[in-house]
Image (cartoon, helix red, strand yellow):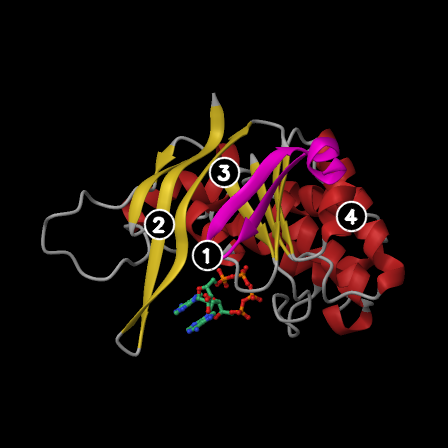
């Protein structure tokens, strides 16, 4: 059974009265534990697809299920406003099951918070965490230290601020913050595009290793063929709102 299932999904934006088809009929199925890569040039629809799978945007038509949560649009025909985020009622289960790592490890970390507080913050809301997570301050502190260790940051990082770390280290902080929630699915949107070339491979190796150790289903999006090839075991190639090819990584890259 697929942990993520997308069936014939379309998403049409309206931009100054013009219909912009961002997705034109996309289907994929990601089994639990797979490292699924989505590659395609800018504007091919990758972010739109990710946002729909994460419940941040709604398909115009088709069916979408993530971690057992049905994110499909309401049946067409009724008077319905422009697609928007899924109703919060549906998203409770998804928030605890799916976490994000974004391209920009600068923008996503609050510069006024210590790294310890940044990584602990999602634990303050049990809805973010599978099984509710640690309930006491001491247990949260232990969970944060365990995660910082897992991503290769020194334990004294907890008392420091994001600007005291390099780009690669900041992305490690963002990964720790996502994984402290014990998600089933980690969505990584261009996770190394903003990093120096010299540290990209380290961060990708870390993602691959953590995916194995935590039995994560990894959804990795990049415009960079090399990045996807390095991490993914299954690849979908997007072009102009469609998946034009998909299969095991070795097979796709052989063509
Ligand atoms: P990618 O992530 O591959 O760069 P996107 O999913 O961001 O592609 O965009 C796919 C297409 O949809 C592009 O033509 C883009 O301009 C358009 N698009 C994306 N988001 C919006 C939006 N919020 N409003 C209007 N058009 C959008
Ligand atoms: P990406 O880095 O994935 O290519 P962009 O930088 O193109 O994404 O877009 C950043 C944000 O702006 C996204 O949330 C996307 O949905 C939105 N967006 C992209 N294209 C448009 C557009 N033509 N009109 C409005 N919003 C857009």
Q: Nearer the viewer, mark 1 or mark 2?
A: 2
Q: Which residue is mark 3?
A: 97
Residue 15 position within the rendered picture, expressed as x and y whole percent measured from the top left: 33, 74
Front-most of residues 76 and 160: 76
Q: Residue furthest top?
A: 1
Q: For the residues marked 2 and 3, what is the alpha-carbon distance in whole angstroms?
A: 24 Å
> Along the polypeptide, which appears first: circle 4 or circle 2?
2
Residue at the farthest front position = 255
Mark 1 vs mark 4: which is more N-terminal? Answer: 1
Q: Which of the two marks, 3 or 4, is nearer to us in this view? A: 4
Q: Quadrant of the C terminus?
A: top right
Name the front one of labels 1 and 4: 1
Magenta residue span: 234-255
User: In the image, is the residue at mark 1 within 8 Å of ligand 1 by its beta carbon?
Assistant: yes
Q: CA distance from mark 3 to mark 4?
A: 21 Å
Which residue in the structure is indicated by mark 1? 48
Name the residue carrying label 4.
204
Marker count (numbered): 4
CA gap between label 4 and label 2 equals 30 Å
> Is residue 251 shown in magenta?
yes
Q: Circle 2 is placed at which residue position?
A: 10
């Amino acid at each position: 059974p697929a942990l993520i299932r997308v069936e014939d999904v379309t998403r049409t934006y309206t931009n100054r009265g013009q219909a912009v088809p961002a997705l034109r009929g996309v289907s994929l199925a990601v089994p639990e534990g797979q490292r699924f890569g989505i590659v395609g040039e800018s504007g091919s629809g990758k972010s739109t697809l990710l946002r729909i799978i994460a419940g941040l945007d709604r398909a115009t038509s088709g069916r979408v299920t993530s971690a057992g949560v049905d994110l499909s649009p309401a049946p067409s025909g009724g008077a319905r406003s422009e697609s928007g985020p899924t109703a919060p009622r549906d998203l409770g289960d998804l928030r605890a099951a799916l976490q994000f790592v974004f391209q920009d490890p600068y923008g996503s970390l609050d510069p006024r918070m210590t790294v310890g507080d940044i990584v602990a913050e999602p634990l303050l809301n049990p809805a973010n965490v599978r099984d509710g997570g640690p309930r006491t301050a001491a247990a949260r502190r232990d969970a944060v230290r365990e995660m910082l260790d897992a991503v290769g940051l020194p334990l004294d990082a907890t008392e420091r601020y994001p600007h005291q770390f390099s780009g690669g280290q900041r992305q490690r902080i963002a990964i720790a913050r996502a994984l402290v929630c014990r998600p089933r699915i980690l969505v990584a949107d261009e996770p190394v595009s903003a990093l120096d070339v010299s540290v990209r491979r380290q961060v990708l190796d870390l993602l691959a290793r953590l995916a194995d150790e935590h039995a994560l289903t990894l959804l990795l999006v990049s415009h960079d063929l090399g990045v996807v090839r390095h991490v993914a075991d299954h690849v979908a190639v997007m072009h102009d709102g469609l998946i034009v090819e998909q299969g095991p990584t070795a097979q796709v890259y052989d063509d």
